[in-house]
Structure formats: structure tokens, C-alpha cells
Amino acid sequence: MLKKARDMYKMQKEAKKIKKELKSIHIEAEHRGVTVVVSAEMNVVSVNIDSSVPMDMAGEYVKEATNRALSKAQIVSSEKMQGIMGEMGFGG
């Protein structure tokens, strides 16, 4: 019972550490002059729209760049979690 409590405490501590790490990892994606940067925690950090982007297409390009960045962020995030779960003996 005590071992399970220690394992849970260790897992919570590691999860907090990973969450902090994910905030500092930034992933960038670009689509036709729109660049979006997100954190591995899935938060948008910045959006840059080049002046050459047609305004009627800006929304679509922002959406595409954001989706690409978030997809990459999901991969990074899951790789980090798999690593820590493997270290703790939960597979990965």
C-alpha cells in the first residue's frame, strides 16, 4: 500500500515536471505565408501573417498552419509522456 502511494506521488511529480517542459517546447508550422507557433502544451504562442497573404484567404491559411502545428505538438507531447511512462514501468 505504501509503495503504491509513493509511486503515485512520484508519478504526480513527474507529470508536473513534464507539463512545465511542454510549456517551454515550441513547435512552428507554416502554410502559404502564415506561421503559427504553439507550445507542446497545445497553446498558441504566436501567429504571423505575411503581408503578401490575401486577406480573403488568411483565415483558411491560419487554420491550416494551426492544425499542422497542433498535430506536431501532439506527437511531441505523447513522446514525452511515453518516455516517462516507460521509465516508471507502465510501458511506452
Image: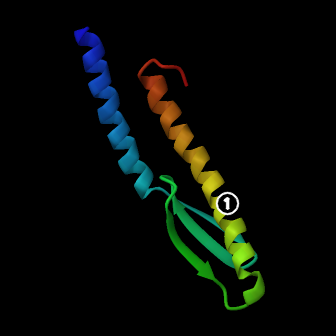
* Other-residue count near label 1 (Cα within 10 Å), few / some / many at <14 / 14–19 / ≥20: some
Is residue 57 toward the left or the right of residue 47 in the image? right
Count of numbered marks: 1
List x then y, in percent, for residue 3.
27, 11
List x then y, in percent, for residue 71.
65, 52
Q: Which residue is mark 1?
A: 67
Q: Is residue 74 above or below residue 39?
A: above
Q: Is residue 63 above or below residue 91?
A: below
Amino acid at dot 1:
Asn
Task: Kindly identify the residue that appears in the image at 60 percent across and 70 percent down.
Answer: 36
Q: Nearer the viewer, residue 33 or 63?
A: 63
For residue 9, what is the image quadrant? top left
Task: Kindly identify the residue that appears in the image at 77 percent across and 81 percent down.
Answer: 57
Q: Quadrant of the C terminus?
A: top right
List x then y, in percent, for residue 45.
49, 68
Name, please, the residue furthest toward the bottom.
51
Task: Kindly identify the residue that appears in the image at 55 percent across and 39 percent down.
Answer: 78
